[in-house]
Amino acid sequence: MKQTVLAAFAAGSMAFCAVGQAETLEFEGTIPSNRDVVRLPLTLSTDLTNAVLWTDSFQNGLHFDPIVALWRDGVLLGQNDDHMLMPGQTVYDSSLLFGHLDAGTYLVTIAGYANFANGELLGSGFRYDDPVVEANPLNNCVPGGDCPGNYWHLNLSDGPIPQVPEPAASALWVAGLGLLALRAGRGAFRRIAQPLAWRARCSG
């Protein structure tokens, strides 16, 4: 039988919230096991542009690996397991970006890996609803290994998306600068270094 958890706000236990333009909301709670699904009813009072749902609670393995999905009228709008888009996220956090969300009522679900939705309809349930499918132990413990916690923290915001460079992209950028510096040669270095040295002497 499907088990669900009604999520609570950080500041209380309301089931619905109203979201206006240029706001950030935070939600938090715990999930009893990775057969459970957290369900967060959500009411948007206005349309949102560049709306982002993201978790920042994985914390490099301190807490469980979340799957976040957004639904409207029982239809899946998006689902994500691993995606770093916002500051504070680590490798197995989730994030969903929607260019536009109409005002109205939605449902957010949070589940542990690998309890994905079975399809595009909420009524189709989730992978671990089937007792035949082997689920990970409580809190996503690895047999014979560590046992991460079951805390989750979800954020919802709209507006400009901060630029969070991927580590690989940053490394390529630094390497490219290094190659350009090498190609510049000693002459270019002298032309740069001499004015700097002059300024240093004058300031002394």
Image: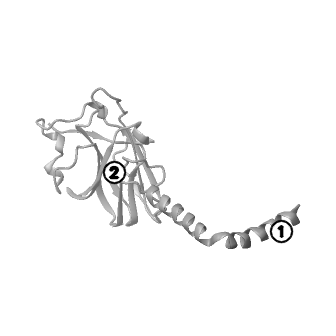
Q: Which residue is drawn at 17% across and 57% down?
A: 120
Q: Which of 145 and 159 is in front in this view?
A: 145
Work out how far the residue at label 1 is from the one at label 2, CA to CA, in angstroms: 51 Å
Report helix, strand or loop for mark 1.
helix
Classed neighbour count for the residue bearing mark 1: other residues with Cα under 10 Å, few (<14), some (14–19), many (≥20): few
Q: Is residue 111 above or below residue 150?
A: below
Q: Can I make out residue 9 in this image?
A: no
Classed neighbour count for the residue bearing mark 2: other residues with Cα under 10 Å, few (<14), some (14–19), many (≥20): many
Q: Which amino acid does label 2 sit on?
A: Asp
Q: Position of residue 122 (x, y in %)?
A: 18, 52
Q: Which amino acid does label 1 sit on?
A: Trp
Q: Where is residue 104 in the image (x, y as percent from the top left)?
A: 31, 61
Report helix, strand or loop for mark 2.
loop
Number of numbered discs overlaid on the protein picture: 2
Which residue sits furthest left?
Answer: 132
Q: Which residue is drawn at 27% across and 28% down?
A: 143
Q: Residue at x 41, y 36 (%)?
A: 62
| Left or right of 5, for residue 48 | right
Q: Nearer the viewer, residue 129 or 7?
A: 129
Give the residue at mark 2.
82
Q: Can I make out residue 24 in this image?
A: yes
Give the residue at mark 1.
198
Q: Tag 2 or tag 1, which sits nearer the N-term?
A: 2
Q: Which residue is drawn at 38% across and 48% down?
A: 93
Q: Position of residue 177 (x, y in %)?
A: 56, 66
Q: In this view, does 152 lie above or below 47?
A: above
Q: Which of 11 and 195 is in front in this view?
A: 195
Q: Which of 110 and 116 is in front in this view?
A: 116
Which residue sits furthest top?
Answer: 144
Circle 1 or circle 2, nearest the eye: 1
Q: Position of residue 199 (x, y in %)?
A: 82, 67
